[in-house]
Image: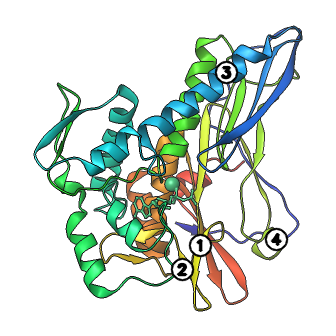
Amino acid sequence: MSLAQASATARRVLLPATLDRAPPPLGGRVHGFTGRTMGTTWSVRLVAGVRLAREPVFRAIQGALDEVVAQMSTWEPGSTLSRFNRAEAGTWHPLPAEFHEVLACARAVAERSDGAFDPTAGALVDAWGFGPAPRGELPRAARLAQARARAGWRRLDLDPARRALLQPGRLALDLSAIAKGFGVDLVARRLHALGLESHLVEVGGELRGSGVKPDGRPWWVQLEHPDAEAGGAPVLLALHGLSVATSGDYRRWFEHAGTRYSHTIDPRDGLPIRHGLAAVTVIHAGCMQADAWSTALNVLGPVDGTALAGRLGLAARFVVRRGAGFEERTSVAFDQFLK
Ligand code: ADP
Ligand code: MG
């Protein structure tokens, strides 16, 4: 781990290890699309000829995101996930391929983060009022104890052959910390299938880029920072076959009696995280992985999180609150992108 000391004016540039030399598509230009999904916005920029038929492309993008919501949203009472959460104990539920893929990744991140990330934290999320039913007050100890008893990724019983999941009784899934990233990946896959290989996909701030623009340059993005003024130099990243996701309580929180609570819960004690982390950004080939790991490392905090990122070779940046300002910690894998 290194503690980056950056001057407030310098711009730091992150480049992927390999930039393929494929020429930009001839005669192409950048087309922009935007829409709404998962309580936030999405945007796509892609390279195609001037005569691109926009409507089918828009439908492919919105359709992919609508599928993710229909399967994995806790906010849709009719989603596959919501129906699973309400199901009787002892019942098996065949999962659509996408749901299965996300749950398998979520379980792997849960295991490797020792439960800091937990896709079965749904009852805890509800107890704190971060789910669809907001609560004006803090949960009482008894309610929290009940919610904790219902959670636990080790209760997941997934039959890979049948792609079916067992409801062991009152297990409540919540995939909100990974589904946005997966939505980005799914949109990118659909664009590839349409032959639109050069694109930048964004859902609620999580990004994935592929190919280059008509001028041959990669898609440059600026990494999110809670306070670019106080926190040092802006970081620019060329998203060439890469994704980036950020988790942080500077974006979204819950307030009670003048106190701000993070909407990310530490499933190990059932409480909103309360260390000094403002944001964790993860760069990964897959946006689903980047999204899940940014949440996992956010829960683990600046000390355990940087240690695990180091051990697993994850490219991560931690923005830690220090008094009125911010301090940055980056993993070795993150620094390797720095040119
Ligand atoms: P953001 O909305 O800032 O992108 P995250 O990707 O970290 O945030 O997702 C936060 C959401 O994930 C919460 O609103 C909640 O539904 C769910 N969640 C909270 N804590 C955890 C956790 N420890 N593991 C998995 N999901 C969580
Ligand atoms: Mg996340």
Ligand 1 within 8 Å of disc 1? The answer is no
Residue under label 4 = 7
- Front residue of 98 and 301: 98
Amino acid bearing label 2 = Tyr
Secondary element at image label 4:
loop
Residue under label 2 = 261
Residue 89 at x, y percent in the picture: 13, 50
Contact? badges 4 and 1 (CB < 8 Å): no
**Disc 3 and disc 1: Cα gap in Å?**
32 Å
Amino acid bearing label 4 = Ser
Q: Residues within 10 Å of mark 3 (few under 14, many from 20)?
A: few
Number of the label disc, if any, that sits on residue 253? 1
Instruction: Please name which of the two marks, 4 or 1, marks the residue nearer to the observer.
Output: 1
Amino acid bearing label 1 = Trp
Instruction: Please name which of the two marks, 3 or 2, marks the residue nearer to the observer.
Output: 3
Residue under label 3 = 59
Contact? badges 1 and 2 (CB < 8 Å): yes
Q: Is residue 253 visible?
A: yes
